[in-house]
Amino acid sequence: MSSIGRLLRVSILGESHGTCVGALVDGCPAGLPLEEADLAADLARRRAGAPGTTARIEPDVPRIASGVFEGRTTGAPILILIGNEAARPADYEGLSRTPRPGHADLAARLKYGGHADPRGGGHFSGRLTAALVAAGAIARRLIEPVEISARVTQAGGDADAHAAARAAADDRDSIGGIVECTARNVPAGLGGPLFDGVEPLLAHALLSIPGIKGIEFGAGFAAVRMRGSEHNDAITGAGGRTATNHAGGANGGITNGNPLVFRVAVRPAASIGRPQAPVALSTGAGAVVTIGGRHDACIALRVPVVAEAVTAIVLADLMLIEGRLARVLSRKEGSK
Ligand SMILES: Cc1cc2nc3c(=O)[nH]c(=O)nc-3n(C[C@H](O)[C@H](O)[C@H](O)COP(=O)(O)O)c2cc1C
């Protein structure tokens, strides 16, 4: 399913080269000031344009089609639509016959009996993350003063992510990368044991971003080389603050008053400009094909704002569940 969340339910819709992508945000409390311009800054951060990102530049002008009246949320579902103005479906005409190796083309074809939209990955495209970012911009406003920021720490093993991305693009190839995300001012007590832990909920949501292949919290995989004496975070105050943050902000699935810190692994894009030999479905034979279209040589460069949005959505849902939204939404004058 393309929906996530319990009290704040976010559904993502659309296809890469269809008319639009969009998000339906249900469960947002009434009274939150919201207009289309509030979504613009995050959408601009996701937009392509840097070397190593796709040549497909979408204006990403969001339209709030429901759920907002006189500049405030009404409590009804909020529908955000973002047009695909720079779509070029003709670039993908051969794809239903020769699915791209490494992309979702063939898996979707097998699952949906050939009915899935094959144009540029259809519903499986990274284009859908524009809708996630728009929904996340609403969640971010809800959870203030929680602050979420993410950055690329390396791409293709190189600390200079932009140079590495440029080199990969020049080589008509793609590279992966690591994105580190930190959420500050997160109240202690969000999440719970086992399946409703803050880490499993974040992992579920973050691994749902197309192309994300791994996640680690705090010291993460490096913890296997540490001793307990080194890994234990010394508690410095009754509020749960610790001297170090190897746990990454949660113990037992419950936020502990420290920043949430995690890193996601972003794969290299499947669509590369080098000749490949995908199987031609009609004949079963390998045919050398060069994938057309416009693609990201380094997806990781575009992921930070997406990871922030997804984190905000998960935290907003948890804060609604725990009754922990700090932001006071005023009642309309004259209403009782
Ligand atoms: C912002 C963003 C942009 C992306 N751009 C591309 C792209 O240009 N080419 C490509 O092959 N994959 C791209 N992807 C990744 C694919 O959508 C993803 O690899 C594909 O759906 C298969 O899913 P999986 O890698 O999770 O198995 C992008 C992902 C994101 C988050």
Image (cartoon, rainbow, N blue to C red):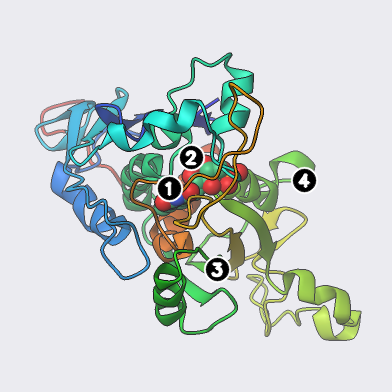
What numbered label is drawn on residue 325?
A: 1
Ligand 1 near label 2 (Cβ, under 8 Å)?
no
SS label for mark 2: helix
Ligand 1 near label 1 (Cβ, under 8 Å)?
no
Label 3 packing within 10 angstroms: few (<14), some (14-19), many (20+): many
What residue type is disc 2 on?
Leu
Task: Find disc 4 in the rendering and name its residue.
Answer: 193
Q: Is 276 left or right of 18, judged from the image as shown?
A: right
Q: Is 138 left or right of 177, judged from the image as shown?
A: left
Cβ atoms at labels 1 and 2 below 8 Å apart: yes
SS label for mark 4: loop
Q: CA distance from mark 1 to mark 3?
A: 33 Å
What numbered label is drawn on residue 320?
A: 2
Residue plotted at (65% across, 32% down): 285
Ligand 1 near label 4 (Cβ, under 8 Å)?
no
What numbered label is drawn on residue 177?
A: 3
